[in-house]
Image (spheres, helix red, strand yellow):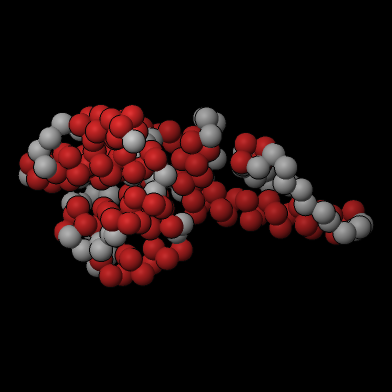
Amino acid sequence: MKNKPTYPSHRSVLDPEITIRLPRMCAREALHVISILAELDAAIWRLHGDGLADELALHGVDTPCPPDAKTLANSDNPRRHALGSAMKASLYWSNLTSHDERMRDTMEYLFSQHPKLLHFVFNPDHPELRAQPEILLQDAQCFSTGEKILIQVALDLWDACGNARISDIIHRLDRHHFVKVLMLMQQCRGEPKDAALLCYRHSEISF
């Protein structure tokens, strides 16, 4: 029997209460189900290796990806080899202008906990959007409300084409990402990054 790569399972990390109830089946049927699930597990890791590793990292799990998982660490870019499966949200742009460097740092900071969104919006190897803004906004409908707002903010900071609403930023982003957006707005005004956080803490005390 051909040996297949072993794929990590972290169900207890994501949802310890989840249960699956299966109907009664014979041994042959059970083996068939196991085979299907194993193939599905392997296919998902091959397709979404980076995203799965990043999600597990958010839960404090340092998981080496399976050898055939699709990760940016398998590319020819030496920086990606150095980062490996534990890499953060990064763009691998080169020959940058000072403006490009500022935008790269801004977007990496905005999406530091969401590598999938960073690579959804931007070409990882060149300072450009992955697609036209209207296409990105349409494709972003599959994401959560908070994720869609971050994408809109990123597009607004990039080329004023995201149409992010102030009311959504205030009422729909969680506190962590709300403060991040404030910090980036302060930076775009040429003020220190920590100024927004200080203002936010002051407002909590004042009100």
* Res. 29 visible in picture: yes
Residue 139 higher or lower than 190, as above or below: below
Q: Is residue 12 left or right of residue 139?
A: right
What's the residue at 49%, 54% (across, down)?
47
Find residue 30 and report its horizontal and vertical position in percent. 84, 55
Quadrant containing the C terminus in the rendered view? top left
* Res. 91 visible in picture: no
Find residue 176 and report its horizontal and vertical position in percent. 38, 38
What's the residue at 52%, 30% (across, down)?
60
What's the residue at 15%, 31% (across, down)?
192
Q: Is residue 61 left or right of residue 119?
A: right
Q: How many marks?
A: 0
Residue 112 or 42: which is nearer the viewer? 112
Residue 115 sits in which quadrant? top left
Find residue 58 and report its horizontal and vertical position in percent. 48, 36
Direction left: furthest residue: 97
Residue 11 or 39: which is nearer the viewer? 11
What's the residue at 43%, 57% (across, down)?
145
Residue 155 sits in which quadrant? bottom left
Residue 97 higher or lower than 162, as above or below: above
Find residue 165 and report its horizontal and vertical position in percent. 29, 60
